[in-house]
Image: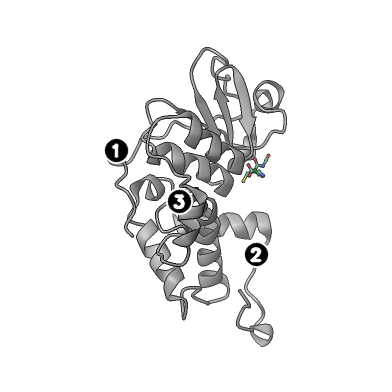
Amino acid sequence: MAAAAAPRSSGKEALPAALGSASEPPRLFDGTTRLYICYFCPFAQRAWIIRNFKGLQDKIELVGIDLQDKPAWYKEKVYEQGTVPSLEHNGKIMGESLDLIKYIDSHFEGPALLPEIEAALSKFGDGPFFLGQFSLVDIAYVTIIERIQIYYSHIRKYEITNGRPNLEKFIEEINRIEAYTQTKNDPLYLLDLAKTHLKARPLPETNAQPPQL
Ligand SMILES: N[C@@H](CCC(=O)N[C@@H](CS)C(=O)NCC(=O)O)C(=O)O
């Protein structure tokens, strides 16, 4: 089944510059709802996708955090775990991407993304999405699948969609959803980050084996 149409289609959103150690914090707890993210983080991307999909661009302000030059106030004043994403809402700060996507789904307007579980499970396998229609489950997985596809393709020269038509269809269909495509980065940039931070390297020729996924 095709995804429900995203409620708003507006071209690429202009993203605010990421805040670094020299930046002032926003006016915390002034009633503004803020989603603190790093534009390249797969966990933050989950919360960003649901914010877009529910059409909350005017209700939830994005605050980019530069994790390479993290402002001290982020951990001290905003979210003591110091990780992104976090959400400032109703005078509280919450974190953990999987909790946040459920929270945003149930506390804000826009299409519901957690279907009735029994009905949804009966559609499991109908594709292209995990529960038949686009849902929180797809959001939870896609940001990781996006990166795995890039890393395997470039580092191991292996296409994860080969011989996996359901995965191929999932990737094709989710790339029609603007709420998601708006959050994507240049694959080569993500690859570069992985090489630098995860020390991901190509296998030596002699050890190259088809990966077990
Ligand atoms: N379990 C957390 C993981 C969040 C996380 O590890 N985010 C990374 C960025 S991708 C982070 O904020 N790291 C802290 C840092 O780099 O200083 C979630 O799902 O929200």
Q: Judging from the image, what secondary structure is the residue with disc 1 in? A: loop
- Residue at 72% from the left image edge and 33% from the top image edge: 81
Q: In this view, does 94 lie to the left or right of 186?
A: right
- Residue at 36% from the left image edge and 35% from the top image edge: 55
Q: Where is residue 96 in the image (x, y as percent from the top left)?
A: 64, 39
The amino acid type, in three-letter code, at marker 3 is Asn
Q: Name the residue under label 2.
A: 200
The amino acid type, in three-letter code, at marker 1 is Arg
Q: Name the residue under label 1.
A: 8
Q: How is the image coloured?
A: one colour
Distance between the Cα atoms at labels 2 and 1? 37 Å
- Residue at 35% from the left image edge and 37% from the top image edge: 13
Q: Position of residue 47 (x, y in %)?
A: 51, 40
Which of the marked residues, 1 or 3, is nearer the chain's N terminus?
Answer: 1
> In which quadrant will I find the C terminus?
bottom right
Label 2 CA crowd tier, 10 Å (few <14, some 14–19, many 20+):
some
Distance between the Cα atoms at labels 3 and 2? 18 Å
Residue 149 drawn above or below residue 207: above
Nearer-the-camera pick, 86 or 198: 86
Q: Residue furthest top?
A: 30
Q: Mark 3 points at which residue?
A: 185
Kindly tell me whether residue 21 is visible in this rendering. no
Q: Judging from the image, what secondary structure is the residue with disc 3 in? A: loop
